[in-house]
Image: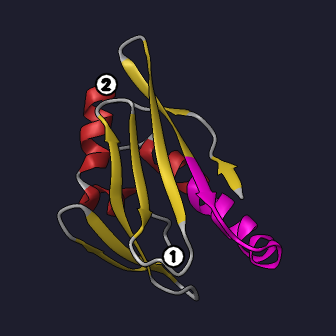
């Protein structure tokens, strides 16, 4: 299953946006309002949304200033969340891309909440 957020332009340069996302504790600032738990380590963070199980993401790939890939820290449901960063004049745009290997039943159940989640991340990053 693959999902993409809307592309949003930020107030940051490409490098500033990448550095912001590289510090995983900053994800707390762009999480949805219904986040009930957030704990950050050096290269990973754990979060929970109300009514959902905890999810731990860790940095699994870096392409400075262009792409940052977060993956599931626990292997139960393998997925990645990628931030693709592009430059538009002196500002940066970002698209979040989610890719997961789910069976059709699971994909049907999680598609809507995941779409809302990644779109919320992109909407919120435009304001930081």
The secondary structure that dominates the magenta segment is: helix
Q: Is residue 81 magenta?
A: no
Q: Is residue 106 magenta?
A: yes
Location of residue 19 in the rendering, given as x and y in whole percent from the top left corner: 24, 40
Location of residue 87 in the rendering, given as x and y in whole percent from the top left corner: 42, 19
- Left or right for 113, reference 16: right
Q: Characterize the local packing of mark 2: few (<14), some (14-19) or many (20 or more) Cα atoms within 10 angstroms.
A: many
In what element is the residue under mark 2?
loop
Q: Residue at x 54, y 69 (%)?
A: 78
**Quadrant in which the N terminus is drawn:** bottom right
- Left or right for 57, reference 39: right
* Label tally: 2
- Identify which residue, 115 or 98, lies in the foreground: 98
Disc marking residue 3: none
Between marks 2 and 1 in the image, the one whose residue lies nearer the viewer: 2
**Above or below 47: residue 8:** above
Disc marking residue 13: 2
- Identify which residue, 10 or 69, lies in the foreground: 69
Q: Which residues are magenta?
A: 97-118
Q: Residue at x 42, y 32 (%)?
A: 10
């Amino acid at each position: 299953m693959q999902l993409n957020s809307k592309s949003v332009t930020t107030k940051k340069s490409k490098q500033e946006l990448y550095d912001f996302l590289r510090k995983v504790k900053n994800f707390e600032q762009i999480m949805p309002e219904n986040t009930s738990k957030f704990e950050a380590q050096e290269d990973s963070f754990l979060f929970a949304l109300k009514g959902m199980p905890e999810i731990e993401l860790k940095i699994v790939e870096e392409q400075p200033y262009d792409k940052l890939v977060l993956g599931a820290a626990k292997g139960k449901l393998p997925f990645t969340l990628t931030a693709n960063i592009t430059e538009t004049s002196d500002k940066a745009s970002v698209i979040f891309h989610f890719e997961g290997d789910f069976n059709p039943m699971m994909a049907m159940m999680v598609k809507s909440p995941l779409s809302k989640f990644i779109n919320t991340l992109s909407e919120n990053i435009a304001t930081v």
